[in-house]
Image (spheres, rainbow, N blue to C red):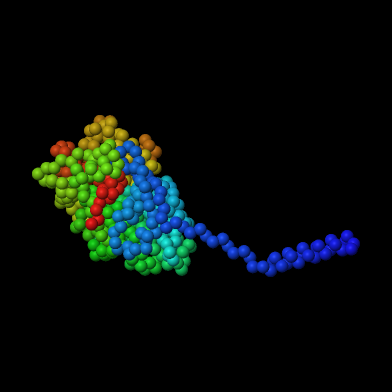
């Protein structure tokens, strides 16, 4: 056979083999590796009662989410708390990655253009049997100008009586969640896990109510697992329901969940699980979980109160002292807290704007203000004594006001709004109840007691008490 014929036959055979291969079914895609039903990882909590982070061991279990959510699960609460107490969005993303969540979406309400009625949050999802579990973390640590949103309570007519600032933020998270589901999980059966601390807890509570009541997101209550920690109240008492899927962990002497009086008509939906705050018990939990170097401030009982919880009630009662409407000689209201209406008319806008200015730019202005006060001990009394003292200082004695302090650190502000807001300081002496409260802080152990109630809001304290908590 000629050489040319052999080459031609080989070419024809190669073509035939190629065409035959093309007609075969394509190879099956690789089977995805199933995600583990149980994952253990470590994370860090900004303990705040010691000069170091608290390292905690966490265990994610899909079994948490196979049960009816109405039953309080301490292990799921601890897992939720470890994430809720994260001090950065990157830490939360790392936690969700460790638990094999996919399509992790991080929204940061930080930087120079902060929405004071918004918040940062993180979404992710992973399969649990035939459902997709969506994890929702609402950021409540180390935020800045959102402090103004904390104070934006709104009148009883606004936002159907809900806390206006928290519910505006919850509405934005809700809208983003609907978009996330449409993009990643359309047509899927869902379970939802929500957690948040402090401001994040209040927004989480309102978000859960939106999901349950609006019904745009198809998920049964038994498949919603909501754990909030030290959440301020956010829902109108007329709207609030004892939804069994919402579990609110609250330290009985923490000032933050209790600061807004019941008479304002705002509460939490779901069920509260109260952690005791007896000083001996709290210190024993701290020593067991964190170490002997974790110590609470000293608490001193008096004739007016015997326990930290009673002291907290004493503070709130003092704050609600009925005060006059106007400051003499000046067309502005005296700050008053005796009712929601009085708070909104005399405090809300001014205090919100001051905090918005002080907390932006990584709290540069707040730091400068605190440094100036610590260096000039008499300046506060001087500010209280002059109508525009807090705004422009007292030039005749060489004391600055907030205007000069802001200029010194380069913080931008609206001059007219700042002037009106600063006048709140001159109105304080006209409020006898508030002045009585301020005076009481100067002696009798009251300042240390107040520090105790604030320290009950620290993540290390809450986590330690939850570790020691017996739900039975």
Left or right position of 252 against 171: left
Residue 40 in the image, given as x and y percentages of width and height: 40, 50
Left or right position of 269 against 121: left
Image mark count: 0
Q: Quadrant of residue 12?
A: bottom right
Residue 414 in the image, given as x and y percentages of width and height: 36, 46
Q: Residue at x 22, y 36 (%)?
A: 382
Q: Residue at x 20, y 54 (%)?
A: 261
Q: Residue at x 42, y 62 (%)?
A: 128
Residue 160 in the image, given as x and y percentages of width and height: 28, 63
- Split into 4 quadrants, where in the image is the N terminus? bottom right
Q: Residue at x 27, y 33 (%)?
A: 374
Left or right position of 132 against 340: right
Residue 98 in the image, given as x and y percentages of width and height: 44, 51
- Above or below for 173 versus 296: below
Pick the front one: 53 or 237: 53
- Split into 4 quadrants, where in the image is the C terminus? bottom left
């Amino acid at each position: 056979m000629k050489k040319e014929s052999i080459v031609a036959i080989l070419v024809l055979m190669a073509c035939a083999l190629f065409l035959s291969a093309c007609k075969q079914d394509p190879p099956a895609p690789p089977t995805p590796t199933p995600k583990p039903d149980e994952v253990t990882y470590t994370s860090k909590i900004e303990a705040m009662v010691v000069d170091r982070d608290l390292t905690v061991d966490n265990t994610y279990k899909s079994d948490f989410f196979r049960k009816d959510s109405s039953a309080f699960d301490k292990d799921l609460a601890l897992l939720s708390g470890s994430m809720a107490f994260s001090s950065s969005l990157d830490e939360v993303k790392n936690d969700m990655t460790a638990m094999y969540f996919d399509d992790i979406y991080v929204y940061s309400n930080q930087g120079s253009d902060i929405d004071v009625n918004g918040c940062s949050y993180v979404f992710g999802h992973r399969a649990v049997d035939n459902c997709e579990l969506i994890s929702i973390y609402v950021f409540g640590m180390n935020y800045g100008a959102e402090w103004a949103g904390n104070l934006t309570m709104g009148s009883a007519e606004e936002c159907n009586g809900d806390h206006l600032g928290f519910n505006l933020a919850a509405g934005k998270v809700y809208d983003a969640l609907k978009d996330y589901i449409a993009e990643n999980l359309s047509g899927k059966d869902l379970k939802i896990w929500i957690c948040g601390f402090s401001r994040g807890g209040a927004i989480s509570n309102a978000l859960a109510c939106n999901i349950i009541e609006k019904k745009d997101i198809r998920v049964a209550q038994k498949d919603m697992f909501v754990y909030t920690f030290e959440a301020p109240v956010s829902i109108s008492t007329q709207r609030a329901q004892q939804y069994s899927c919402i579990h609110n962990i609250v330290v009985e002497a923490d000032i933050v969940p209790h600061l807004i009086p019941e008479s304002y008509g705002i509460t939490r939906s779901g069920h509260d699980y109260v952690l005791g705050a007896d000083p001996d018990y709290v210190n024993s939990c701290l020593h067991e979980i964190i170490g002997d170097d974790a110590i609470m401030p000293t608490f001193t009982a008096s004739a007016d109160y015997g326990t930290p919880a009673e002291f907290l009630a004493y503070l709130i009662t003092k704050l609600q002292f009925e005060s006059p409407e106007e400051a003499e000689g000046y067309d502005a209201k005296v700050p008053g807290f005796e009712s929601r209406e009085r708070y909104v008319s005399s405090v809300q806008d001014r205090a919100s704007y001051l905090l918005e200015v002080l907390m932006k730019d990584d709290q540069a202005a707040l730091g400068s203000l605190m440094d100036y006060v610590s260096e000039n001990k008499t300046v506060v009394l001087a500010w209280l004594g002059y109508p525009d003292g807090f705004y422009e200082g007292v030039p005749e004695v060489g004391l600055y006001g907030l205007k000069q302090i802001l200029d010194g650190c380069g913080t931008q502000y609206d001059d007219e709004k700042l002037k009106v807001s600063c006048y709140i300081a001159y109105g304080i002496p006209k409020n006898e109840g508030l002045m009585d409260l301020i005076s009481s802080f100067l002696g009798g152990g009251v300042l240390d007691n107040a520090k105790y109630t604030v320290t009950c809001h620290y993540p290390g304290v809450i986590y330690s008490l939850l570790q020691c908590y017996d739900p039975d």
